[in-house]
Amino acid sequence: MVKAIVGANWGDEGKGKITDLLAETADVVVRFQGGANAGHTIVNEYGKFALHTLPSGVFNSQVTNVIGNGVALNIPVLIGEIKAIRERGVPQPKLLVSDRAQMVMPYHILFDQYEEERLAGKSFGSTKSGIAPFYSDKYAKIGFQVQELFDEAALKEKLKGVLEVKNILVENLYHKPLLEAEEIFRELLDWKEMIAPYVADTSAFLYQAVQDGKEILLEGQLGSMKDPDHGIYPMVTSSSTLAGYGAVGAGIPPYEIKKIVTVSKAYSSAVGAGAFVSEIFGDEADELRRRGGDGGEFGATTGRPRRMGWYDCVASRYGCRLQGTTDVAFTVLDVLGYLPEIPVCVAYEIDGKQTREFPTTGLLEKAKPVLEMLPGWNCDIRGIRRFEDLPENARNYVEFIEKQIGFPITMVSNGPGREDIIYRNV
Ligand code: GDP
């Protein structure tokens, strides 16, 4: 069976933990979009890890991990991550990299930096990992697939042609040193050596795995709000974050995705710019940020402090709907135990009118949160394993949100570890 694990919100919902958990019984874990610009944090018997490119199945020795064609592949980052986990005692993971995945080129990272510099204060808050320039080139049809590394003459020829165009921008728009084809070509030859052991026709592999009835997880990065079509455009990422794109970015039939586990955190956080209706500030935000996640809400890739807010039922209901959610995994509930009362955003007020529908970006900028106060439970709920054993107010909080978003919460996560999970039959 194919299951997708995706985010309902702005990312950082705890997808890494849920994937790591579900990977215990999985045969294959696939990354299908995004690149090394976001990260998953995973805590398990080997320690605490921030993964940026490796699929979250790398800690389970029976899992084959796949980097699908939809991913923005940064080869040195990938190889560095493998080395880093090996150094900490994790066995060499089984890994396949799609021969059709495209590579983040050295100049994509430069262009990301140059463009942020040029935009200065008006920037998109890019992580400068080259993701936007990468996807622009992919769809402009001047990207490089992994398999192109293996035809050196054609590679060199194409690279020269692409750099001719790139250097016009480098020289005239950014006023930076020109890109050298020979230097980049040599770098690509090194990459070829690094990646060669992993390259495969992954859609053929996955097709067979589906035929054989294997358990396959599609691991999403970021969340619905960052989807380029349905999210808070233009403050979005450059590849689709939706489960539906899993079929494209992995190369499997869409009708094989039978379960869509959408992860949503018990409060909100976001990174980068863009409207964030239930955002909180000052001491209130600092306290939630400090207590949040596992050791505070700071970016797994960038270390940036995340923007904080109360749970947003409007955004989450929309986010779950776009994912095609069959199950919601509701995470980080334990963190809210310090609050006597918990505000929840149940509607938006736009131009004096209330709505529960998530609006387009222009209207979103004007939206104000309509908050409802729920009683807190004022205690530590970590270690609890059954829903019935949660304090009544914690159960009410979960049930209230489930009703608001309209999708069943079948998992409640109450701690960062693999064992901190409560299953619910609803
Ligand atoms: P992802 O990108 O969606 O995987 O999210 P992150 O890597 O930002 O994960 C969120 C953070 O919360 C990580 O530090 C996790 O270890 C942590 N985490 C996940 N689930 C829980 C939970 O239920 N409770 C607590 N306290 N932390 C959690």
Image: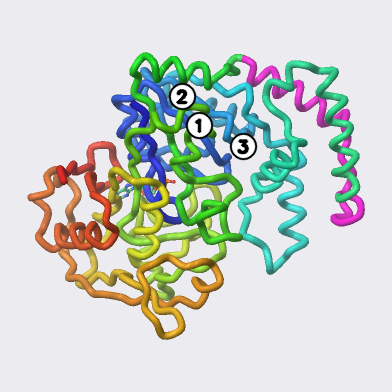
Judge left or right: residue 340 versus residue 52.
Answer: left
Q: Residues within 10 Å of mark 3 (few under 14, many from 20)?
A: many
Residues in magenta, as a range? 170-196
Q: Which residue is mark 3?
A: 72
**Residue 154's x, y, as percent?**
83, 20
Q: Residues within 10 Å of mark 1 (few under 14, many from 20)?
A: many
Judge left or right: residue 194 versus residue 399.
Answer: right
Judge left or right: residue 365 versus residue 4.
Answer: right
Distance CA(mark 3)–CA(mark 2): 16 Å
Numbered disc in front, either 2 or 1: 2
Q: Residue at x 75, y 56 (%)?
A: 115
Q: Which residue is mark 2?
A: 65
**Residue 345's x, y, as percent?**
33, 70
Residue contact at pointers 2 and 1, CB within 8 angstroms? yes
The disc, 2 or 1, on the residue closer to the chain's N-terminal end is 1
Q: For numbered disc 2, what is the local secondary structure? A: strand
Q: For numbered disc 1, what is the local secondary structure? A: loop
Q: Label for residue 54?
A: 1
- Disc 1 marks a residue whose amino acid type is Leu
- Disc 2 marks a residue whose amino acid type is Asn
Q: Residue at x 38, y 19 (%)?
A: 61
In the rendered view, tell whether residue 387 sits above or below residue 189: below
The way the protein has been coloured in the rendering is rainbow
**Residue 231's x, y, as percent?**
51, 57
Distance CA(mark 1)–CA(mark 3): 12 Å
Q: Residue at x 33, y 54 (%)?
A: 265
